[in-house]
């Protein structure tokens, strides 16, 4: 999309956004729930549930570039199957799923996402509390993950499943960018986990993608970058992931799969420290980063989207294109991006719509597909309990820009 078309779309979106009330009500914090888990059920009219054993669809091979293009625009089911915390204990799938305050995921919610124009859903999944001492994943948890995947595929959308808060800065995170840990059992545990996930879903069609990990950090949880040893460890883990999935049989030999940088970062040192793994299947590998820049607008107190913010986004995408899309010949997705609704005003909703449109248009120039991070709280654009859109100006900006309108 040209700059002129984007600016015109901004004007339309700004006017449209003023017709709606502000999106945010009460920002939601991780680990905090104001609603008892037992009451967190959707109120929408129920759809026909997907069968326990869905009829396998025909696997149609498509290249990674074709897949990224076909996904168009994506949405994150954040803070649901990725909830974690030692305080939850060895609990039921339902209790984990609702532990951070979101309701149980329903087919009605996923249907609303599809009806709003999205064509892909990233389903973050945390596995650490669901593995026993031998690394075996609880069958009930696998079944619940499959049920949510089936919701997405039943709506004819792409679905991404990953290894989420097993990484990151939390005390429970066991997957670290640390060569000593890699050599002392971590790599074996990682392979064991992906062997189980890959085998469980090996007969699913090409609309299901696997993502190697989320925001992996070093032993000291450094978010701002690390050393070459840490970057090399991430590269080694990505290679293990590719090797494990490809050798698992079924449709996984040609499945499109996704690998990430250290911390899923788009910063220069993390991007230049990333080396694409060797894949025996050509053109079935996708790279991913996450972007929450400009930080002042996305997570700070800035409430106006301006040309300086646009320049920040342009610089990031120029780097990603130079170092990964062109430099390593890998198609890309932005697995997470978004801006918090921290003022709860119509004016800021309009600015967030401008941001969403500009971001997606900037990515689109390089063939990069974007996934909005929806945490059910300050970044939510869907009301999960009611199973309906919550922030229509932002949804419209995302979808229309991705469609080139």
Image (spheres, rainbow, N blue to C red):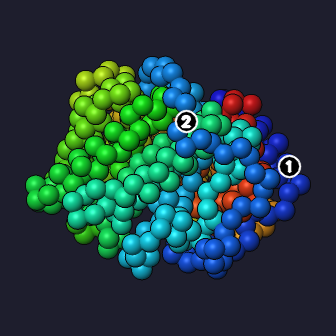
Residue at mark 2: 54
Quarter of the image for residue 216 reads bottom left
Outermost right residue = 19
The image quadrant where one finds the N terminus is top right
Residue depicted at 47% across the width and 68% down the height = 92
Taking 29 as reference, is 388 above or below it? above
The x and y percentages for residue 195 are: 28, 43
Residue depicted at 44% across the width and 37% down the height = 209
The local secondary structure at tag 1 comes to: helix
Q: Is residue 11 left or right of residue 97?
A: right
* Mark pair 2, 1: CA separation: 44 Å
Residue depicted at 45% across the width and 46% down the height = 161
> Mark 1, residues whose alpha carbon is within 10 Å: few (<14), some, or many (≥20)?
few
Compare residues 344 and 78 and report the one nearer the observer: 78
Q: Earlier in the sequence, mark 2 or mark 1?
A: 1
The local secondary structure at tag 2 comes to: loop
The image quadrant where one finds the C terminus is top right
The label number, if any, that marks residue 15 in the structure image: 1
The x and y percentages for residue 113 are: 69, 46
The x and y percentages for residue 291 are: 49, 51
Q: Nearer the viewer, mark 2 or mark 1?
A: 2
Compare residues 150 and 350 and report the one nearer the observer: 150
Q: Is residue 74 visible?
A: no
Taking 57 as reference, is 134 above or below it? below
The x and y percentages for residue 35 are: 66, 77
Q: Is residue 281 left or right of residue 97?
A: left
Q: Is residue 271 left or right of residue 143?
A: left
Residue depicted at 68% across the width and 73% down the height = 39
Compare residues 251 and 367 and report the one nearer the observer: 251
């Amino acid at each position: 999309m040209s700059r002129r078309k984007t600016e015109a779309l901004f004007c339309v979106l700004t006017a449209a956004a003023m017709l709606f009330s502000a999106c945010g009500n009460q920002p939601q914090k991780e680990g905090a729930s104001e609603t008892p888990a037992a009451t967190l059920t959707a109120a929408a009219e129920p759809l026909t549930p997907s069968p326990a054993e869905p009829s396998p669809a025909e696997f149609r091979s498509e290249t990674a570039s074709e897949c990224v293009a076909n996904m168009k625009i994506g949405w994150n089911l954040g803070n649901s199957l990725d909830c974690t915390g030692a305080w939850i204990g060895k609990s039921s799938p339902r209790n984990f799923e609702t532990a951070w305050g979101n309701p149980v995921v329903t087919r009605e919610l996923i249907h609303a996402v599809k009806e709003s124009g999205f064509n892909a859903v990233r389903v973050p999944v945390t596995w650490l509390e669901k593995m026993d001492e031998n690394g075996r994943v609880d069958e009930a948890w696998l079944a619940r993950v499959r049920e949510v995947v089936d919701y997405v595929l039943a709506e004819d959308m792409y679905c991404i499943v990953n290894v989420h808060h097993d990484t990151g800065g939390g005390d429970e995170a066991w997957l670290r960018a640390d060569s000593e840990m890699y050599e002392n059992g971590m790599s074996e545990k990682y392979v064991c986990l992906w062997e189980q996930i890959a085998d469980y879903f090996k007969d699913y069609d090409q609309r299901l993608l696997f993502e190697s990990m989320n925001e992996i950090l070093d032993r000291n949880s450094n978010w701002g970058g690390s050393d070459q040893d840490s970057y090399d460890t991430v590269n080694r883990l990505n290679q293990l992931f590719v090797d494990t999935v490809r050798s698992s049989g079924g449709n996984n030999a040609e499945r499109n799969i996704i690998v990430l940088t250290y911390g899923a970062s788009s910063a220069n040192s993390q991007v230049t420290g990333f080396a694409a793994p060797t894949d025996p299947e050509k053109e079935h590998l996708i790279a991913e980063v996450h972007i929450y820049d400009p930080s002042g607008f996305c997570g700070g107190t800035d409430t106006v989207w301006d040309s300086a913010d646009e320049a920040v986004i342009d610089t990031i995408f120029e780097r990603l294109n130079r170092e990964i899309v062109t430099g390593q010949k890998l198609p890309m997705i932005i697995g997470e991006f978004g801006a918090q609704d921290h003022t709860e005003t119509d004016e800021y909703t309009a600015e967030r719509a401008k941001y969403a449109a500009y971001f997606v248009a900037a990515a689109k120039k390089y063939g990069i597909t974007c996934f909005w991070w929806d945490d059910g709280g300050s970044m939510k654009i869907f009301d999960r309990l009611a199973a309906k859109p919550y922030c229509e100006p932002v949804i419209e900006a995302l979808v229309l820009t991705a469609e080139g309108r």
